[in-house]
Image (cartoon, rainbow, N blue to C red):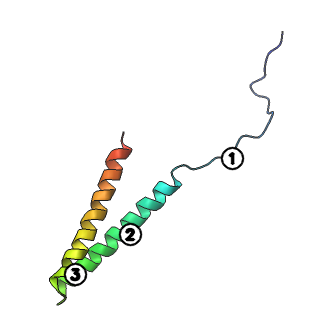
Amino acid sequence: MTGTDPYRFTSPPPPATDPDRGADLTRTLLWSLLVLSAAANMATSYSGVTPWANVACGVVTLLSAGALVVRRLRGRR
């Protein structure tokens, strides 16, 4: 009767790889961009800078927040 012993170590297990490492980096960069652009938006609102700078910072804030929401909703699938 031949059988295999499931508790016998024949070779070391393969090294664990983290497939979400790139996703974590992207999420971190998006959050950093969101915080920096929101702070820049607030600073340009209170200073006497041209309105185009305020609008540009607001657009970057909106896009980064939207990208974070889309990534979160796609991750739930």
Mark 1 lies on residue: 15
Q: Is residue 56 above or below residue 30?
A: below
Are dots 1 and 3 in contact, CB under 8 Å?
Answer: no
Give the mark nearest the N terminus, 1 or 3: 1
Disc 3 from disc 2: Cα separation: 19 Å
Q: Splitting the image into 4 quarters, where does residue 12 fall?
A: top right
Q: Nearer the viewer, residue 30 or 52?
A: 52
Q: What residue appears at the point 36 percent right and 42 percent down from the top-left corner?
A: 76
Residue 39: x %, y % from top left: 28, 77
Crowdedness of circle 2 by 10 Å Cα count: few (<14), some, many (20+)?
few
Q: Nearer the viewer, mark 3 or mark 2?
A: 3
Q: Which mark is residue 53?
A: 3
- Of helix, strand and loop, which one carries label 1? loop
Q: Nearer the viewer, residue 55 or 1?
A: 55
Q: Which mark is residue 32?
A: 2
Viewport quadrant of the C terminus: top left
Q: Give, as a three-letter code, the residue at label 1.
A: Pro
In the displayed orientation, state which residue is furthest to the right: 1
Q: Give, as a three-letter code, the residue at label 2.
A: Ser
Q: Splitting the image into 4 quarters, where does residue 74 fall?
A: top left
Q: What residue appears at the point 57 percent right and 50 percent down from the top-left corner?
A: 18
Q: Give, as a three-letter code, the residue at label 3.
A: Ala
**Numbered label tally:** 3
Residue 35: x %, y % from top left: 33, 71
